[in-house]
Image (cartoon, helix red, strand yellow):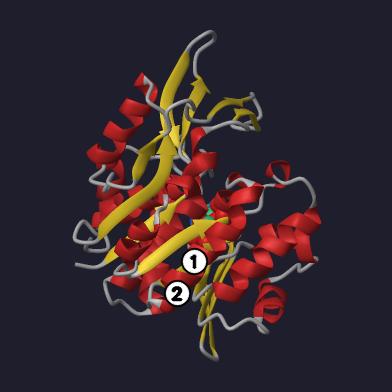
Amino acid sequence: MKNIYFIGECMIELRATVPSTLHQSFAGDVYNSAVYLKRCFPQISTSVITALGEDNLSKKMRERFASEQLNTDYVFAHNSKVPGMYYIETDEQGERSFIYWRDDSAAKKVVEFISPGLVKQLSSGDMFFFSGISLAVIEEQARAQFWDIVKQLKAAGVKIVFDPNYRARLWDNVEQTKAQYHSAFSLADITLPGVEDLETLYNVQSVEAVIDYLAPYNINEIIVKNGPDSVITKEANTVQSHSITPVKNVVDTTSAGDAFNGVYLGARLDGRPISEAVKLGAQAAGAVIQQPGAIAPKDVFQQAMAKSGL
Ligand code: ADP
């Protein structure tokens, strides 16, 4: 059985619905990707590596992971921390705004739980995924240990996958981010950047410029996302442009990139070629942005993906 690990943070989501009413759910980039991968490719063992607390919401979050058929063996419980949380509100113009409570979340401690024995277990995996958000969440003093773990996994043959997913507010300064991203690009076998992510950091303004920027790194598979415009891939020295069918009624673009990533990687693990993996990833993202929130209802999502035989 193929397997993939997603390391990072899942948060408690509070969404304002009608006045004075909050809808509570769970979301976070790596979790979102894991969910969509597993929904499309149930035969792939999909694990979330994170730390929660010992509270009731942590318990519910773990149950939610399990209800999505995700492996929870590496979901750890910190004895004094609780999960991060965010509040999302959409105004009459459709503009979203967020408030976060995540500076002291349990997930920041995740590296503490990764023992040498666990690294050994993870070494038999096929892919290890982290994002720029995962990197920002990991505490500064734990980063050296994190990179050591990534190096061990890579040496054992696990494919290292990185999505830069840049969120300025999670970092102290741009130099810090760039140093971490340099390590990530140096170790990655696959990367899935969005043009917007890299624009602020490196002043690259097109898919071509992103490809050029990454050329000095030894990354075998580069997938550049550019909203509804196109996806450009580069595998070894083959560059391909893939067209995207724009969605007319976009409801909420939250987790478009996450859905794309999960389904793309699932398809690659399933042995499908890059062009088909992009098609499936884009189809998943297109379905997700027609629903509010990060995680689309299972039946609606499955129905949209059934058109492509999944
Ligand atoms: P992110 O969510 O990381 O910012 P993008 O905005 O580039 O990423 O979107 C990720 C993927 O979602 C795109 O590659 C595309 O497949 C899909 N997507 C995004 N916006 C649209 C849209 N308006 N219509 C159709 N597909 C879209």
* Direction from residue 280 to residue 141 in the image, left or right: right
Residue located at (51% from left, 89% from top):
236
Asked whether the beta carbons under mark 2 and mark 1 sit within 8 Å of each other, the answer is: yes
Q: Nearer the viewer, residue 36 or 102?
A: 102
Residue 45 placement (x, y as % from top left): 24, 58
Which quarter holds ligand 1? Answer: bottom right
Mark 1 crowdedness (10 Å alpha carbons): few <14, some 14-19, many ≥20: many
Q: Nearer the viewer, residue 17 or 108?
A: 108
Q: Which residue bears the numbered disc 2?
A: 154
Residue 52 placement (x, y as % from top left): 42, 34
Q: Quadrant of the N terminus?
A: bottom left
> Does any portion of residue 227 appear in the rendered image?
no
* Direction from residue 286 to residue 219 in the image, left or right: right
Amino acid type, residue under disc 2 in the picture: Lys
Q: Which residue bears the numbered disc 1?
A: 150
Residue located at (28% from left, 44% from top):
72
Q: Residue furthest top?
A: 20
Q: Quadrant of the C terminus?
A: bottom left
Amino acid type, residue under disc 1 in the picture: Val
Quarter of the image where one finds residue 102: top right
Name the secondary structure under disc 1. helix
- Kindly identify which numbered label has been placed on residue 21: none
Mark 2–mark 1 distance (CA, rounded to whole Å): 6 Å
Q: Nearer the viewer, residue 293 or 221?
A: 221
Judge whether 168 appears above or below 201 on screen: above
Judge whether 42 appears above or below 296 on screen: below
Q: Nearer the viewer, residue 218 or 301?
A: 218
* Direction from residue 37 to residue 109 in the image, left or right: right
Judge whether 23 appears above or below 98 on screen: above
Residue located at (35% from left, 42% from top):
75
